[in-house]
Image (cartoon, rainbow, N blue to C red):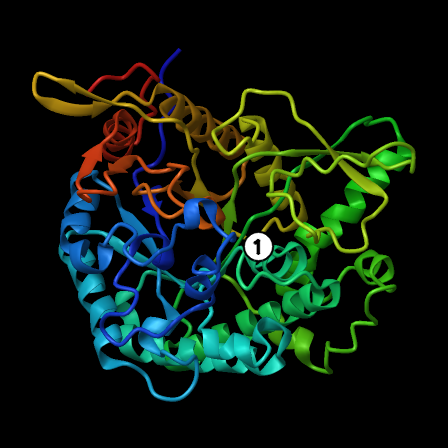
Amino acid sequence: MSARSFPSDFLWGSATASYQIEGGATEGGRGPSIWDTFSHTPGKTLNGDTGDVADDHFHRWQEDVEHIKNLGLGAYRFSISWSRVQPGGSGDFNAEGIAFYSALVDGLLAAGVKPVVTLYHWDLPQELEDEGGWTNRETAYAFARYARRMAEELGDRIDVWTTLNEPWCTAYLGYGSGVHAPGRTEPLAALQAVHHLNLAHGLAVQQIREVLGDSAKTSITLNLHVFRPDDPSSEADQGAVRTVDALANRAFLGPVLDGAYPVDLLENTASVTDWSFVQDGDLEITKQPLDVLGVNYYSTARVKHYSGQGERQQADGHKDSAGTPWIAADDVEFLPQPGPYTAMGWNIEPAGLTDLLVSLRDSYPDQPLMVTENGAAFEDTVVVEDGVARVHDVERVSYLHDHVEALGLARDQGVDVRGYFAWSLLDNFEWAYGYDRRFGIIRVDYETLERTWKDSAHWYRRLATTNTLPPVDYSA
């Protein structure tokens, strides 16, 4: 059987996020974000780790661009730190911060790499959070003004403009369970954030297109969940799937692609809110034509209807907390998944990616897709062979191989998937888990900040430069 191949125009890339890699937290005119505040609050992150230095990409970006070039990648997905280019989230913009990203974009283009920009990857300027953050409708308008300025500054040098990364995490983990910044545990606030993020997306797309015209390619990246019912023949378990699917998936797909919130979502959450924060005309704004829908995928979840007997299981893959991201879903429980697992404790199920992509095609047949994040954290060991440091991360290579194959299986079924971005280019600050979890295909020594290609980087280079899926045991 011949190895799987991809067309020459299929886009291979890797992805990062500003707070996770940049460092330079107080340099270059950058203001504090909610993740600065959260990570500096005792007990919020593992080992008290912060993004103050991270991978020091702020100073080492040229070296990192060289790695991207040497990997043979066609695209690099990075996020802009809003508080670096506009420290307060409103008011004056910071010329030094804008210049940093402009130079990065030029460096990528000189290396033959398409810049894919994410305008928001969770690091809201702290001043905006002080005014209510994403519970405040005005934040959506502030975001639109910021998006417009970035379009004016970076212009047609950007290949794809992604408004938001994983608004589910921003809303539900930031305002519901509190395990992410800003650390609030307020069900109403989480649902307000859902809508204001959807509104921010629509407003930003309007502004980008107003500046750059219809030629500007726009996107949003969603971490769409794949829920498996514990008993597929049980109507109650199927109902549990619908409940969490409404919260996790259709709360974003509905407004963004259909121009409406799902009726069952509104009914299920009626005990929390009447959704009166959705104003007339909002859903015309949230529904904007998208050139590509970004899909992030890591694992699946297994759910069942909670009968009320015994302790309700909540093995949803997220840190335990006093709050919950599953608003008004008290009759749903999340069951432990069969392995194998990554270092995050997430199950490995490549078939879930195929199922997700096919289901999106079935629901939105004309919507092009792109896998904008996929990867895994594992325990990495550095060995020195013939004086050269190596990381033999066969588990990560296997993970990437099997998920790229899963993407290929979706393409075999006619799904329009146009690219794949490995998460992540570099080991980095893994949010509340600090520096304990390593997702990178390139290892970062956090003491020396030296970069070392893992076997997965060599494997991925082979894939990106040949468009042919290498075997797991491929050796550079």
- Residue on which the image places disc 1: 169
**Quick check: 305 left or right of 292?**
right
Q: Measuring 32% from the left and 72% from the top, which residue is drawn there?
A: 84
Q: Position of residue 181 (x, y in %)?
A: 53, 60
Report the residue that reaches farthest toward the top: 1
Q: Is residue 377 above or below residue 259?
A: above
Which amino acid type is marked by label 1? Cys
Residue 215 in view in this figure? no
Q: Measuring 75% from the left and 47% from the top, which residue is drawn there?
A: 244
Q: Position of residue 249 (x, y in %)?
A: 66, 51
Q: Is residue 48 above or below residue 136?
A: above
Q: Measuring 39% from the left and 50% from the top, which residue is drawn there?
A: 49
Residue 146 in view in this figure? yes
**Quick check: 9 left or right of 318?**
left
In-front residue for pair 33/165: 33
Q: Residues within 10 Å of mark 1 (few under 14, many from 20)?
A: many
- Tag 1, which secondary structure? helix
Q: How many marks?
A: 1
In-front residue for pair 178/44: 44
In-front residue for pair 144/366: 144
